[in-house]
Amino acid sequence: MHSYPTRYLGVLLCILCTSIASAQSIIKGQVMDQVTGESLSNASVYIQGTGEGTISDRTGHFTLTTQHAFPLTLVISFVGYRSQQITLQEPTTTLNIQLVPTEVLGRETIISATRVPERIIESPVSIERLSSVQLKQAAAPDFYNAIGNLKGVNVVNSGLLFPTLTTRGFAASGSTSVNQFLDGMNTEAPGLNFSVGNVIGVNDLDLENVELLPGAASALYGAGGTNGTILITSKDPFRYQGFSALVKEGVMHVNDPEHGATLFQEYEARYAKAFQNKWAFKINADYIKGYDWIADDTSNYDAQNFTVKSGTRLTDPAYDGVNVYGDEITVNIHDVAQQMAQAGVISQQAASQVPNQNVTRTGYREKYLVDYHTYNLKLSGMLAYKITPKITASLTAYYGAGTTVYTGSDRYSLNHFHIGMYKAQIQGEHFNLFGYTTQEDAGKSYNATVLGELINEAWKPSTTWYPQFVGAYLQAKQNGAPDALAFQIARTYADQGMPAPTDVSFGQYKDQVNGSPIPQGAKFIEHSSLWHYEGFYDFSYLTQQVVDLQAGISYQRYHLNSKGTLFDDQNKKLTIDQYGFFLQASRKLIHERLRLIASARYDKNQNFAGKLTPRFAAVITVAPNNTIRLSYQTGYKLPTNQNQYIDLNVGRARLIGGLPQFINKYNLINNPGFTVDNVNQYAAAYQAAYISNLQQGQSQQQAQYNAAVTAEKVLQPYVFKTFKPETVYSYELGYRGIIRQVFMIDAYIYTANYKDFFGSVFLIQAKNGPQQIIPQDPNKYYGPQLASDQTRNVYQTTVNSEGKIKTFGWAIGIDYQLPHHYLLSGNLSYNKLNGAPAGFFTQFNTPDYQANIGFSNPDVFRGWGFDLHWRYQNAFLYEGSFAVGRVPAFSTLDAAISYRLVRQKLLFKLGGTNILNHYYQNAFGNPKIGGLYYVSVGYNVF
């Protein structure tokens, strides 16, 4: 007879033995290519519904030890092959798995549309996807540029490393209308509120996939993203292990009239390792180096009327080149002559001979001011620990540093900047909790326009230069020179001592100006940061009998820190708090032929009223693998941190935030501003009245006075309204279908209405308020003060449009999987803006039509493959805060041939973008882009 302790011990031993037996369940097998019979190394093998998995070795063999109870389902996947699922009733050591090359159209799993996994064919909204499989054969130099070939995507290039992606309009250099997330983290620079391309992020080797949601997505992802959301997912170190490397060498600036050919170089490496399926880590490195594309448009620009005008530096005394800086300084030389006469330098008679003419200083071309030696260093790492088979804790870090060029209200040289993102996360089967911080350091970045202006002031102040100009002009006129020649003689004389870009003194002046922060110098200080916390829970396993239900909550805080060089934060701290939460429910009806989805999100920012953004969608399965989708989506966009708090003098205007505090700071209520259109109306009314008065026999002085009094009635002070977030209401109808498993078509049509749309307005203010014109009239007038830079202030601020702005568009894309792995693809998109108020800068900046055609095959013959891609967009008007002008139509052809050695794990590629080398520009004032030709060697990349 056994005692109770003995029995208890026996039971425990039985449980222990059972646990050990379970822990020792072993599955072994080999993964091979079904077509060639070659073994596939680094194929992913994991148990469905768990985090347990492994990878195959160099011979394709794998061993997986599991505690999971049988039966279980193995999922086997490998880049470039169809995934395969195998159900096992018991452990086995003789599995022979043969994977079929190529992906299956429409079967890809996506998560961005509803934040839960689903097939792309079942998505309730339009979505585009780029996988690592597609990337390996793409002619594009990297995955981020390859996104630009997706349906409906518009690209704006500020520089080699700074492409900006948008959809459905409102493109810009650094778009605030598109949210970009990397592993759940918003990659925006906190002080700028937009992503700086992919300068901080994943490299090609660590990319799992990219998903792009065109249109609004605020109901799930919060503020921003009114014109698109990009979700980038990196590789799981448990599933993708081993060492990978990529070396790319290329050449650019071929036949560039502004510069000789230069090298383009990129080096990538990745290493990941898992230990007993408990611990895993990965590290990544990426270094890119090149000489940036050059912006060198010397067209004469009229900044007041936002248009290019005729004239050159030799023919127009008020010349202002688009990409020439320092010539923004403009003074009316008639006013200078009057001041000189009052000081006794010249006679009043001589002063009267100086015309009423604005004159700009001589500037420097951008290529002498901006640092074009561009580079980008990206480092990232992850340490993960499986608390249980279904719960993983991880620490992730992304770091980016580099030099590139950004186009905002001016051209900025982002010089040796640094951005870091650091995340802690716990993720389970039904939940996800994480927090991250983004830390930004502008490094030695500077404003190229301000640099040009201050170099001029450093070598000869305008207070000296303009009197010299006037004196030389009068001397030339006295010698009988006509006006045009007299202006040239005067400029040559005043420019004596101006350092040439090759002079040592020019470099010294440049370093001196860049060494001091704005406003004393051109350097801007930016140490802003973002702190974000978020939680998500999928209740579907509890509620699936009724609905699938998900919920989430988030909180974030911005710390703005520019020390007064960008924001109004001199000797003060600026923080912005924001929180939000969302709820989503979905249900399948009518034998799962109809799926209904409803989402709603509420967000509150400390400076604005709370916003509720609902979304309703339906997916109708009309036939197997053929769906129709309908959706109503709302989104909203907060004014950026710059829109709210900027306070920066950029020469032609002072940029100020749209918050009420700036209206008070610059006294725009008691001393109001007038729009540029209104001031132009005043000028036209004045000129008409002045001519009429002269014709009536009035003296010149009397005619001027009476004209000013008459024209004053035209002026209408600008009235500020409540500053609000921008809201969009979008409707979409789409269809996605697969025919005979080889032909997929995806099409949609949409319309969007924008309310309280953000735009910029220029306001002209009398510097000292209204003034008397003549002693006999005690009344004071604004008009005469608004005509000269000496007596006026110019402000540019962000305001809301009073009316609704509407956009409409459609797109269609096809993929045709031909025999023997050939793939033919194409897409065409159309976007149009309607209803913009007169004189309101919407910055739609999108061509009506864009088209892409691709033709590829990863394995034409014994490892040889190719990719061809043609892209086209028509001409359009680009309205940038930097400049406004026409962008001509262009097309580009990208091409690549590849060769892979499977056993040696090598992939060779010879390719190029814009291989016909037709230089083009996709934003006015930005650089022209030529061909980039490269050769690359990748190890363990497929």
Image: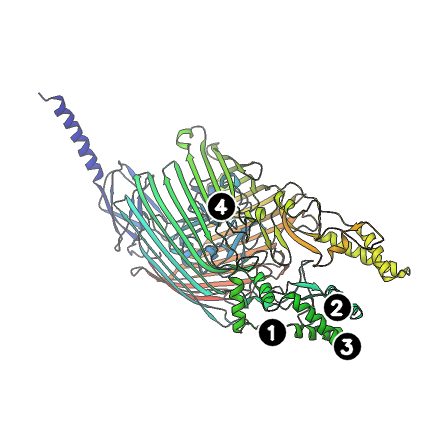
Circle 1 crowding by C-alpha within 10 Å: few under 14, some 14–19, many from 20 = few
Q: Which numbered tag is attached to residue 559?
A: 4
Residue 385 visible: yes
Q: Select label 4 or label 1 by which is in front.
A: 1
Dot 3 and dot 1 residues touching (CB under 8 Å): no
Cα separation between marks 3 and 1: 25 Å
Q: Which of the colour schemes (rainbow, by chain, secondary structure, one colour) is used?
A: rainbow
Upstream in sequence: badge 1 or badge 2: 2
In this view, 510 is above or below 437: below
Upstream in sequence: badge 3 or badge 2: 2
Q: Which numbered tag is attached to residue 831?
A: none
Dot 4 and dot 2 residues touching (CB under 8 Å): no
Upstream in sequence: badge 4 or badge 1: 1
Q: Position of residue 760 (x, y in %)?
A: 64, 50
Quadrant location of the C terminus in the rendered image: bottom left
Say what amino acid the circle numbered 3 marks.
Gln
Q: Residue furthest left?
A: 1
